[in-house]
Amino acid sequence: MSTVNPKPLVLESVNELKQWRNSFTHADLGFVPTMGALHQGHEALMSQAAQAHKSSLLSIFVNPAQFGPQEDLAQYPRTFEADLELARRCGITAVFAPQPQDFYPAGFSTQVEETQLSKPLCGAFRPGHFKGVTTVVLKLFNLVRPHTAYFGLKDAQQFLVIRKMVQDLQLHVRLQGVATVRDPDGLALSSRNRYLSPQQRALAPLLQQHLKCVAHDVVERKTSWLHSLEKAREDLATQGFQVQYLDLLQVPDLSPWPLEGLPPSAPGLLAVAAYLGTTRLIDNVWLGDCKPWTQCS
Ligand code: AMP
């Protein structure tokens, strides 16, 4: 006999979340922070959290603090009823979906900033973005007090920045990174993929293909990695992408990859951000053994 998961409890305000959290008699809570418009990538995080813990909380909050003035805050997709149904199917216990004015009441004036790992890659193109991320995540951790929080490795830099914040501030939370979920043609799932035209959607998997080629060159040392990165940037531009960055950095501190080259097993992050039309896509490949960096207590 198949069991049907109950609908998750919906917590619409910070006060409702506090009351729910204070009613807990156990500490085994898994937490999945998101901005909604959920897809199978989010589903992987929710399923892991629901299966690994007695209780699981999903947050859906399009966080204004992590969007720049020219970015797509107003257009960001909002699909609450469908999100709730996916959360139910995954076995999530409760969904926290606050309003911005409740989460950031008038006069809110505190921000948390990681100052090193948040500088390169997306940090160089989205000023203030990671400060918005660390601020919202720290506030959520404080309210939710999860045992484990689940984050996707598609947002590799975000994961490493949050991991650093957890270490530096000695927060009592375990982090679990979850592998990127992709469409069969290799495109990393993203809430923003729905904005791609059919032609752009057909081009989008090239991002992952170029990353794989560069990764192969780096590991096999077929050509200089600098040359390989430059060629991939040029090819993507020719194919219609506006590339913001395509870079190789060391993990976990996101320092530059050494010019003389590391042994092939040295951990690295090869990451790209590029626009197709007005849609910004990111993707990455981890080089070497990324396991130690995708968990932390
Ligand atoms: P977002 O709603 O975009 O803020 O994402 C919420 C969480 O889902 C983040 O931890 C993301 O890294 C993760 N996520 C988004 N897309 C994917 C994907 N394709 N595979 C795995 N995790 C993902």
Image (cartoon, rainbow, N blue to C red):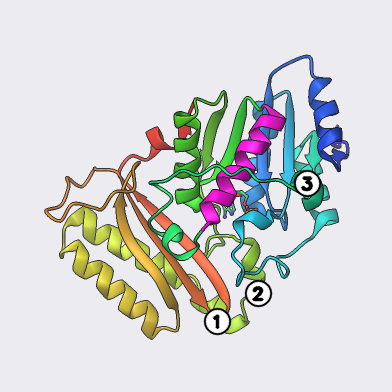
Image vertical order of residue 60 relative to residue 72, above or below: above
Residues marked 1 and 2 touching at CB (< 8 Å): yes
Q: State the residue position of label 2.
A: 195
The quadrant where residue 27 appears: top right
Q: State the residue position of label 1.
A: 277
The amino acid beneath tag 2 is Tyr
Most foreground residue, 261 or 62:
62
Residue 37 in magenta stretch: no
Q: Which residues are magenta?
A: 128-145
Image vertical order of residue 292 relative to residue 273, above or below: above
Q: In what element is the residue under mark 1?
A: loop
What is the spatial separation of the Cα atoms under label 1 and label 2, in whole angstroms? 9 Å
* Mark 3 nearby-residue class (10 Å; few <14, some 14–19, many ≥20): few
Q: In what element is the residue under mark 3?
A: loop
Magenta region, main secondary structure? helix
The amino acid beneath tag 3 is Pro
The amino acid beneath tag 1 is Gly
Q: State the residue position of label 3.
A: 105
The quadrant where residue 236 appears: bottom left
What residue appears at the point 61 percent right and 41 percent down from the top-left corner?
Answer: 137
Which one is closest to the eye, mark 2 or mark 3? 3
Would residue 144 be found to the left or right of residue 153 on screen?
A: right
What is the spatial separation of the Cα atoms under label 1 and label 3, in whole angstroms? 35 Å
Query: Ligand 1: does it lie within 8 Å of the C-beta at label 2?
Result: no
Residue 134 in magenta stretch: yes
Would residue 31 be found to the left or right of residue 281 on screen?
A: right
Estimate the x, y position of residue 42 in percent, counting from the top left: 65, 49
Residues marked 1 and 3 touching at CB (< 8 Å): no
